[in-house]
Amino acid sequence: MTSEGWGTPPVEPISQHYIVCGGNALAHRLVLELVEHYDVPVVVLVADRTRDHAPQIEQLSGVAAVVEYASVTEEALRAVSIGTARGLALVEGSDQENIHAALSAQNHNPDIRIVFRMFNQRLGENIERLLKNGAALSGSATAAPAFASAALGRPNSVEIEGRYLHIAFDDDITSDRICVVADHIDRQDVGRMRLLPEQRGDSADFVRLASEFGDDGPIRAGGVRREPVPPAAPEAEQGGRAALQVLRIEPREPTDWTRRLRWRLLDTMRFFTSARMRLVLLTALAAVLLAFGVLWYLNRNFGWTVYIALLDLAGAAQPDQLSDIASGTGTGGFWQRVAQVVITICGITFAPVATAIAVEVLGSGRRGQPRNPGAGTRDHVIVVGLGNVGTRVATQLHDMGVPVVCMERDPQARGVAAVRALGIPVVVGDGPFEQQLRRARLKHSRALVAVSGDDATNLEAALEARHGNPEVRVVVRLFEDDFASHFYRTLDNAASRSVSYLAAPAFAAALMGREVRGTLSVLRHVLLIAELKVEDGSGLIGLNRHDLEDPGGVRVIAARFSHGGPLQWNFPDRTRRLAPGDQIVVAATRSGLARLNTVAVEE
């Protein structure tokens, strides 16, 4: 393939379209979001039409064109009509390549909306300042909290002004829930679930009272009450429910200091794995204790005995001279001299072992030095795959105080040095999963998170882990929905997440100029928590909660009005109309947020 590029360029001049650069899973999901939920024309720029997800992207209806170029060059941008495009999404390539492409696109079209993927979030924030209308997002940072929370078996949460929103299921739902977000939940058939179903309106109680006091109601003037006709029995609700709730404090996973001390002591035992070494050291220790007892018996002074024994152990004791013995100024006679010789010889055995332990402990703490999981590693999470997502997951778990062990086949992988710098043990090698998991101390782990870029590899790691430890919780990164469905049907105490499925809605919303604060997983479905600000000329002006929620897929969970003040959660006035300067926080499905974004840009 040459730099000239080839593919299916637009036959006719195109404008007001959106450009997606990339052929990976995130690009695939993003294109689906744009064409299915936002109904906008999309042009896709790929490096190779025959690799990754490019063939599937080319088959999507609604894609205006798929153009192939080896890299995002000036010529490639002109080929996809960058000058007349409304938005550009850069979701593949390195941070440096995406920065270069974003700046080039802005030179061609200063008003274009640019969303680019960045692993280095700090650098991304600085690049945003150089762009007139740009946003830097990290797909791995968006998805990592969902994987970490699933590994710990606790809800993922999104922070909104000091409150942490999370999804609760069935018996964990409390009376102060914000709203019901899903029903008909069947873990064996996730397709039956309804996300943000219709709910009883706030006026339902008033309607019931009015019907009771009305002409046909059971309560008549004078206080006479007639027996009401019993209503028809409602249809038994099938499946479970999920609701959006608030946590006051983000839950943490501290490790008790006594457990850490016990693990440290057990970890020290890895230096004595050889049976021969244990026999030699135990024999030497017994001889030292016996010699110590002889010295104490002869001198009857415990402090002096400890002092002289330590000096002998270090080889620093002053031996008796013949002149001292002849003059009667020796240290205690024949048996004392024998005891001191025994302690000194045993000290020769202990010294190299102590030196090796000190060098190992101090050396493993240096940046970039490997540290294998020791015998004291307990109740930890194994992270398989140290790409962008795996590195984020391991770092987040480590920051929460959860013991982590990582596995990676490629010693040059991006995340190996990063997690080693944090002191996280890493098992590196291309051996069978059974052997690698044994080295990672699978039998003592609490969960395994498989987040490599290949579905088959992740599934293999999960099944091998469950075979080696039937009680371990497994969390698997899967792109294919068929894989995920079989996974849920086959394994219990398991969870499946898709990075592209979690991140694509945030990229699509950012491309439309909306801020998605986070994503919450409801099994394989995604609930978006987004902030919308009502600006002059916005189509949101004049709408109330009924207008926003009745079409479905949206719940207004908080509002801040133009006069300022804190967010008002579950604002009860459903008839108040939005005005310029107002701000609302919504929980929405992907299609629901797409509808709001479409309304918001109408003038």
Image: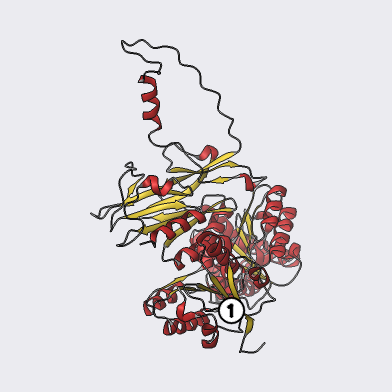
In the image, residue 99 sits, relative to residue 603, either above or below, namely below
Residue 136 or residue 463, whichever sits in front? 136
Res 574 quadrant in image: top left
Amino acid at pointer 1:
Val
Residue holding disc 1:
11
Q: Residue at x 66, y 46 (%)?
A: 189
Q: Is residue 254 visible?
A: no
Q: Quadrant of the C terminus?
A: bottom left
Secondary structure type for disc 1: loop
Res 596 quadrant in image: bottom left
Q: Position of residue 331 (x, y in %)?
A: 55, 70
Residue 15 or residue 67, whichever sits in front? 15
In the image, residue 387 sits, relative to residue 575, either above or below, namely below
Task: Tell whether 211 sits left or right of 481.
Answer: left
Task: Tell whether 575 sits left or right of 392.
Answer: left
Q: Quadrant of the N terminus?
A: bottom right
Q: Residue at x 54, y 23 (%)?
A: 232
Query: Furthest residue to the front?
Result: 12
Q: Position of residue 159 (x, y in %)?
A: 41, 55
Q: Position of residue 121 (x, y in %)?
A: 45, 72
Q: Residue at x 39, y 59 (%)?
A: 600
Q: Is residue 150 visible?
A: yes
